[in-house]
Image (spheres, rainbow, N blue to C red):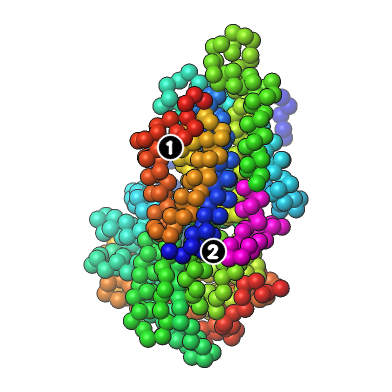
Amino acid sequence: MNYQLLLQLAVQGVLLGGVYGLIAVGLSLIFGVMGVINFAHGPMMVLGMYIAYGILVLLGLDPYVSLLLVAAALFLLGYLVQATVVNRILDFPEAMQVLPLVATGLIIENAVLLGFGPDPRSPRTALGLATLHLGPVMIDVSRLMAFGLAVIITGVVFLFLKYSDIGKSIRAAADNRVGALLVGIRVDRVNNFSFGVGAATTGAAGALLLPLMATSPHLGHDFTMTAFVVVILGGLGSLPGALVGGLILGVAESVSTIMVPATMKQVVSFALLVAIMLFRPQGLFGGRA
Amino acid sequence: MEKKPGLGLDLDRRSFLQVTAAAGAATAISGFPRVLRAAAPTIKIGSVQPVTGPLAVIGLGQRRAAQMAVEYINSRGGIKSMGGAKLELLLGDSQTSAEVGRSEADRLIKEGAKVIVGAFESGTGMAIATLCEQRGVPFLCDVATLDDITQKGYKYTFRIFPTSTTFAKRMIEFLRSIFEEKKVSPKRAVVSYVGDAFGKTQAAFFIKEFKASNLGMEIVEEISYPLGVPDLSAEVAKIKAAKPDVLFPICRPGDSTLLTRELFKQRVELMGIISPGSPGWYEPSVIKDLDKLIYYVMDNVPWVNPESPVYKEANELFLKNYNAYLETNNGYAYTGILVVADALERAKSTDPDKIVEAFKKTEFKDHPMVGEAIKFAPNGDNINATTAMIQILPDPDPLKRTKVVLPKKFAQAPFVFPAPQLWERG
C-alpha cells in the first residue's frame, strides 16, 4: 500500500467533502421544512456557478467575493420558485410533487444552455492554480478555501436557524405546520424564505466549485444525486448530518480510487447509500429533523 | 386605431386572413405549387449529432459545419444531375446517448431523410448503423472511431473517419519518429481515458499496438474515469504515484482542462503529454482556458490540411461566423456533406441502392482534411483516412496555436519534445 498516495487522497476527499456537504445542506433544509425533495437542486447549483462565472468575466470579481451576490441571486430565485411553484403542490401526493421540481430543473438547465452555450467553462481564477506543499502532501488552495467557507456557511445557517426569530419560525413550521399556523406564523412566507436560504447555500456552493471544476449546463443532475446520497447518509433534515455525510462521501469516493477505477465511483457512493438504508435508515444523525 | 398607409389595398386583418386562408386551401387542393417545386426538388439529409449533453460543444460545431456545407452546395447550384435539387439538412440531437441518437435518426428517416450523416459518439454510430440497415437508408458516418461500426457486414454504412486501429498504428509511427529524432528514450507511460465507448476502444487499441511495438516503453498504469467527470484530483494523484515519463490521455472537452490543471497543481513531472487521438486539446475554448498549460501537448488526430483550398474557404467562413476554426470533428462533418453531395450527383437519384452504388465508386479528393482521396473499401471504411500529429505551440493569437507537426509533408512547425514542465513556463 502506498501511504503517501492514501494520505493525499484522504486530504483531497475531506476538502471536496466539505463542498458536498454545503450542497446537501440546502437540500436537507428544504426537505426538513417543506417535506419536498428539490429535484432542481443540481441545476440551481450549476446556475450559481454560471452567475459566478459571469461576474468573473464581466466584472473581474473572484468567486470568493462574488459568493455573496450569487447567494443573493439564488435566494431570490428560490423564494420565487417556492412562492410560484412549490407552495401550490405542498399538499399533493409525493409522486406528484416530483414533476414540477424536475420541470423547474429542466427550465433552469436549458436557460443556462441558452444563455452560455454548451462549452464547458473553466475560467482562470486568482487562486485556481495555487497549491501548498506540506511534505509529500499537496493541498489545493481553492479546495481548502471551498472547504473552509463551506464549513463556515453551514455553521452560520445552523446558528441562524437555532437562534434568530425567523430561524425559530422556520423550525416551528418544519416541526408542526398546523401548530405554527395556529400561533400566527405566516407559514407560506416562512416556506418561501426557507427555500430561498436552501437555494442560496447551493448557489454559494456553486461559486466555490467554479475554481475547482469546469462548469457546463448539464453538470447538475450528477450533483442532485450526490446531494441525495449525502442527505440520506447524514439523516434527512439534519444540517450537521449533511456536512458529516458530505465528508464521508468525499473521502470514500477519493480513497476508493486506489481500489476501483473512477468509472466505478458511483458504485461506491450508491453502495454506501444502500448500506446506510439497510443498517441505519434514519441516517447517521437522523431521528427527528 | 388609426390606419396606417398601406399598399393601396384596403384590407383589414380579418379579411386578409380570410383571403390568404382561402388561397392556401386552394393551393393545397389543386397541388399547383407542387408542380413548381418539382423543377427544383429538395433532398433531405438527416444529421444526428450530440448537440446537448457532455459532448455538446463538439456536436454543435459539427451541426454548424454541416449546415455550412449544405449552403455551400446549394449556392453552387445544388445537385446538378437532378435538375439543381437543393439539399436540406434535417436536424437531430443524440443528447450524447445511443438510444436517443437511434430514435432521432428514425424520426428523421420518417420525415423523409434520404441519407443520414453524423454520430460522433461511437455508441450512437453503432446504433444508427444498425437502424439504417433495417430501414434501408444509407448512413455516412462522418466521425466515430469504433472499428465494429463497419465490421458487421452492413451494406448501407460508410465511414470517412479513421478507425481506432488506424489511430493506434499512426500513433506508434509518430512516437517512433519523435523519439528517434530527439534521441530520447522514455521508459514509463500512463494511459488515462474517459470510460465511454470511444474512450475504451481508443485506449484498448492503442494499448494493444503499443505493447506489440518495441518502443522500449512500458505502460505502468491505466486510469479510466466516467464521461463528464467533475473532479480528477484522485486520478492525478494516482498518475503521480506511477511516476510516468509520458502521459497518453484520451479525453473529451472538460476533462482535459481538469486533468491538465491537476497535473500542474500536483507537480507531476513529465517529458510530455501526447494524446493517442482524442478531442479536448484543440477546441478554441479549451486552448483559451488552459493558456500556457496546454502548450506542447500533442494530439494524434485526423486534421485539416492547411494547404487545401477547400479548407481555406470553409475555415474563413467558419471563423467569421462562429469565431472557431475548422478542426477534426467539424472538419469531417463538413466533408461528410460534400461526400454525400458528390454521391447524389453521380447517383442521379435518391433511390437508396443507387446512392449506395455511388458511394462505392466514390473517389473524392477536394476535401479539407489531411489525406488522399476518400475511397471506400468493401466494408465501407475510407481506405485513405489518416491522422496527423498536432501540437499546441505558443502564439499570441489563441486561434493560431494549433499546428501540424507530423508528418513532415504537412508540418507547419517543428515539434517540441521533451516539453518544459507545466510549472516552468513563466
Residue lying at 27% horizontally and 55% vertically, measured from the top left: B135
Which quarter of the figure has residue B42?
A: bottom left
Q: Residue flagged by tag 2: what amino acid is it?
A: Leu
Query: What percent of the width, then of the height, locates residue B21?
Result: 49, 33
Give whichever of discs 1 and 2 has the lower sequence position.
1
| Mark 1 residue crowding within 10 angstroms, few (<14) / some (14–19) / many (20+) | few
Q: Is residue A129 magenta?
A: yes
User: What chain letter is assigned to the residue under label 1?
Assistant: B
Residue lying at 54% horizontally and 63% vertically, measured from the top left: B259
Q: Is residue A127 above or below residue A95?
A: below
Label 1 and label 2 in one chain = yes
Find the distance from the CA under tag 1 to the CA under tag 2.
63 Å
Q: Is residue A52 left or right of residue A268?
A: right
**Residue matched to label 2:** B259
Q: Secondary structure at mark 1?
A: helix
Q: Is residue B39 above or below residue A289?
A: below
Q: Which mark is residue B26?
A: 1
Q: Is residue A106 magenta?
A: no
Q: Which residues are magenta?
A: A125-147
Q: Residue flagged by tag 1: what amino acid is it?
A: Ala
Q: Is residue B47 above or below residue B404?
A: above
- Total marks placed: 2
Query: What percent of the width, then of the height, locates residue B410?
Result: 53, 84
Residue lying at 30% horizontally and 76% vertically, measured from the top left: B377
Q: Is residue A147 left or right of residue B304?
A: right
Residue lying at 54% horizontally and 15% vertically, measured from the top left: A177
Q: Is residue A286 visible?
A: yes
- Quadrant in which the N terminus of chain A appears: bottom left
Q: Secondary structure at mark 2?
A: helix
Q: Is residue B25 above or below residue A184?
A: below
User: What chain letter is assigned to the residue under label 2?
Assistant: B
